[in-house]
Image (tube, coloured by chain):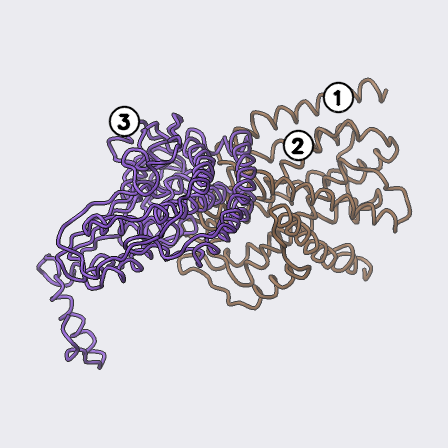
Amino acid sequence: MPKKVRIPVGPQHPALKEPVSFSLELSGERILEATIRLGYNHRGIEKACEERSYIQDLYLLERICGICSHSHSTCFVQAVEEIAKLEVPKRGLYIRTLIAELERVHSHLLWLGVAGHEIGFDTLLMFTWNDREIVMDLLAETTGNRVNYGINSIGGVRRDITDEQIKKIMKAMDTLEERTKYYIKIATEETTIIQRLSGVGVLSHDDAVKLGAVGPTARASSVDRDVRRDDPYAAYGEIKFKVITDNHNDVYGRTIVRVLELMESYNIIRQLLQNIPAGPIAVKAPRKIPAGEALSRYEAPRGEDVHYVKSNGTENPERVKVRAPTLANIQAVAHMLKDRYLADMPIIIAAIDPCFSCTDRAITVKDLGQKSEGLMQWGDLRKYSIEWYKGKGIDFSNLKKI
Amino acid sequence: MGQAIYNILVFPGLFFLILFGWAAEFIDRKIYARGQKRVGPPWYQPVADFIKLAAKEDIVPEEASATSFKLMPLIAMASAVTAFFYIPLWTTEALFSFYGDIIVVMYLLTIPTLTFFLGGWYSRSLYSTIGAMRTLTQLFAYEVPLFVVILASALLANTWSLSEITKFYALHPHLWIFNLLGFGIGIIALLGKLEKGPFDIPEAETEIVAGSFTEYGGRLLAFFRLTLDIEVIVGASLLAAVFLPFGLNLTPAIGFVIYIIKVLFIVILLAVLRTILARFRIDQMLDFCWRYLAPLAFIQILINLLVKGLLLR
């Protein structure tokens, strides 16, 4: 066996739920260096947004992520509402926040299960995912869907919440709180879990700030940052809650932050339901949004999500830019993988709760066959594909030029 | 001659082992599933898995050494089955026995692990190679405690033959209580040997796909999995014979039932441990085995020496 081995983890690998490529240089079981390559999931969503109306974009952007779908759609509507100067009714904001917190609960429970799976503890996975069904059912009942809720509209929300649903959610919160206490107990007392998590994937406070980590990853390195408190949006300004931080700096700390955030979320949901004001849930939004630009921030379960929208007075936005939380955290992963064991690789990657298909925003296409190393532009690509299909006997050249 | 062939191939040999192995796999998977709030597989799942795999095409990697690659599952199974004949099951007499067979059984039980290593090594895939290295590293961790506790029991019986050991414990019915520490160590070492539960490091799915078995498929994988099923029974029978030697002098029918109960008890114990523990890292496993398991195994030897000196005079 040579002294150094380079092994590919991904684009297809059981540890990864989505295609991304890690190239690890190993010496025995120890990782010397890790390089990350993104770009297997580029879907051209930003470009597609420019060709669709604001309402259509809302549904398209909701599909950026399968877990934090509400995060992206809320972030986008907030930017559009800011440009159009729409005043969303209180009740609409409360419902938006409620769904956001339910989404955080389901995302964090999902993460806990995935973390269990990555350290070879499938029992935890089965337990948490079983409890996650409670939240999924609540989401399905209040919004009509389990993941892509489609509850946001520009100027408010699309569905009201009934008193019966409020009672049901309140009751479910009690069950979930009890279950979460049990998970906190497991995470803090079970020896094999602590052994596998503590001291793994260390990211010091300074490194977290320098590498621009966000969300639970940063908060576990005692970076006290949370958009919900620092730049309140929706109904968060009227809710009392703590921002959970931890000083373990490792995967164990990230676990603690997430399970304690769950408890905080139950607290927020209870407050929202108790104080929800009566009234309309939405205002009518114009089809054409006046020219302007806005940047919107949102604390998604994985960290800070940023959307930038520029409008030009037509039905379609001129530019939409999305920065998903994983992009901010991915640099920290390469840092955390260095000098760790191969066995820690899955949990270190999973600890930032990665969502690679949310992250891929840009792609460069190079024609390696040509002598010039130039980038291919849209027109070149179009010409190339028409030529390629002509070779196969299909002629696309008469189609409408985009 | 006919009787011997019947014993080897049908009962209590190969056929019985395969059936019992499948039954044990089903029980293991069912308990694992119920412990995780899942429904679990139907009773015929292990058989169905075997038939499905056996019906598939064998694929040998281009770079692999084809002969070794194909031979490994057969060697693994042959050695696991052979070891079974020297273990006394429900009487004090094994099918075959000679002075020193305890060493032979231990080595025969090591051979499947070595074939996992060689199979992975000959696959030439990166994941297989790392899995193979881990298999071997793990072998060095659990093998010593396992050897030591089994020899400790033999020490008390003052013999090198498994059949003689059970005969001795049948004569001195309560002495097995002193070996309980050894039984616990044996269970943990067996988890490592079977690559199960917290010690499934060589085939850690989320890290190295399937370890040594990454490139295996079809009939070859089916035989490897069958070997693992058989190894569960052989390993459990060995522990039952050495550490739980009671109910051996009864009528064969009752003895048989007690034997089945003993083996199933060990299988259930393994399944429960697998359910409630997270996977160790290879360095943690080595650390655990050498720092705690090996010294405890030597304490077992010490206990047995004292018992031998004080009680068996």
Marks 2 and 3 sit apart, C-alpha to C-alpha, by 45 Å
**Considering depth in this image, is B146 or B178 the residue closer to the camera?**
B178
- Tell me what residue is drawn at x 31 percent, y 59 percent: A59
Q: Quadrant of the C terminus of chain A?
A: bottom left
Q: How many neighbours does mark 3 have within 10 angstroms: few (below 14), some (14-19), or many (20 or more)? A: few
Residue density around tag 1, few if under 14, some if 14–19, many if 20 or more, within 10 Å: some
Q: Quadrant of the N terminus of chain A?
A: top left
The residue under the point 32% across, 46% down is: A22
Q: Chain of mark 3?
A: A
* Mark 1 residue element: helix
Residue B305 tag number: 1
* Residue name at image x 18 percent, y 60 percent: A288
Q: Secondary structure at mark 2?
A: helix
User: How many numbered marks does the figure carry?
Assistant: 3
**Outermost residue, front side:** A279
Mark 1 and mark 3: Cα distance apart in space? 58 Å
Chain B, chosen colour in render: brown
Tell me the colour chain A is drawn in: purple
| Res A99 visible | yes
Q: Which mark is residue A389?
A: none
Looking at the rendered structure, whether the residues under marks 2 and 1 are on a common chain is answered as: yes
The image shows residue B279 at horizontal and vertical percentages of 53, 39
Residue A206 circle label: 3
Which of the marked residues, 2 or 1, is nearer the chain's N terminus? 2
Quadrant in the rendering for residue A25: top left
Q: In front: mark 1 or mark 3?
A: 3
Q: Percent position (x, y) of residue B216?
A: 50, 57
* In this picture, residue A50 sits left or right of residue B129: left
Q: Which residue is mark 2?
A: B185
Kind of residue indicated by mark 3: Asp
Looking at the image, is A249 positioned above or below residue A170? Answer: above
